[in-house]
Amino acid sequence: MNFVFISPHFPHTYWQFCQWLYQNGVKVLGIADAPYDSLQRELKKSLTEYYRVNSLENYDEVYRAVAYFAFRYGRIDWIESNNEYWLEQDARLRTDFNVPAWIDYWGYDSAHDWAWWRKQIVYFMDHLLTEETVEYVI
């Protein structure tokens, strides 16, 4: 599975999400405008590859980064920033690279913190993992 994570360094706790994906056999492909050397060590270890763009605001640059990953690793299975600011860009990239997506409403009682991410990871990974990926992990 090829998971493109846009801005995986922000907020600083997102390395945990990347690490979990990586430990479960997912290729985590990072795109951001931060220098590679400025990324947390844990995040670097969780990324299969990192593509630095000059600006995440420049759609063409980000598009080229995703295109590079698609050329190098094959079909992109998921594109995500986990950041409301980039929702429109995420959606446009998913459309342009034919990446199916859905949005689940978790309700007002859910929080944007690691405890809720743990609950959500279990839910989403059940939808994202294929038999091939599970065989690789096992």
Image (spheres, rainbow, N blue to C red):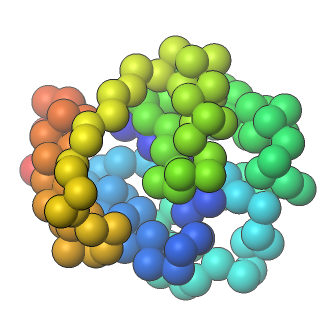
Q: Nearer the viewer, residue 30 or 80?
A: 80
List x then y, in percent, for residue 119: 14, 61
Residue 114 falls left or right of residue 8: left
Position of residue 99 relative to residue 38, above or below, is: above
**Dividing the image into 4 quarters, which one contains the N terminus?**
top left
Q: How many marks?
A: 0
List x then y, in percent, for residue 64: 79, 33
List x then y, in percent, for residue 104: 26, 38
Quarter-of-image position of residue 91: top right
Q: Nearer the viewer, residue 70 or 53?
A: 53
List x then y, in percent, for residue 106: 21, 49
Determine the residue positioned at 80% across, 36% down.
59
Q: Nearer the viewer, residue 2 or 72?
A: 2
Quarter-of-image position of residue 37: bottom right
Q: Confirm whether residue 49 shows in the render.
A: no
Determine the residue positioned at 58% across, 83% down.
40
Q: Confirm whether residue 10 shows in the render.
A: yes
Q: Nearer the viewer, residue 129 or 89?
A: 89
Residue 80 falls left or right of residue 115: right
Position of residue 20 relative to residue 29, above or below, is: below
Determine the residue positioned at 62% across, 52% down.
85
Residue at far front of view? 108
Position of residue 98 relative to residue 72, above or below, is: above
Residue 113 falls left or right of residue 87: left
Residue at far right of view? 54
Position of residue 91 relative to residue 31, above or below, is: above
Determine the residue positioned at 21% across, 62% down.
110
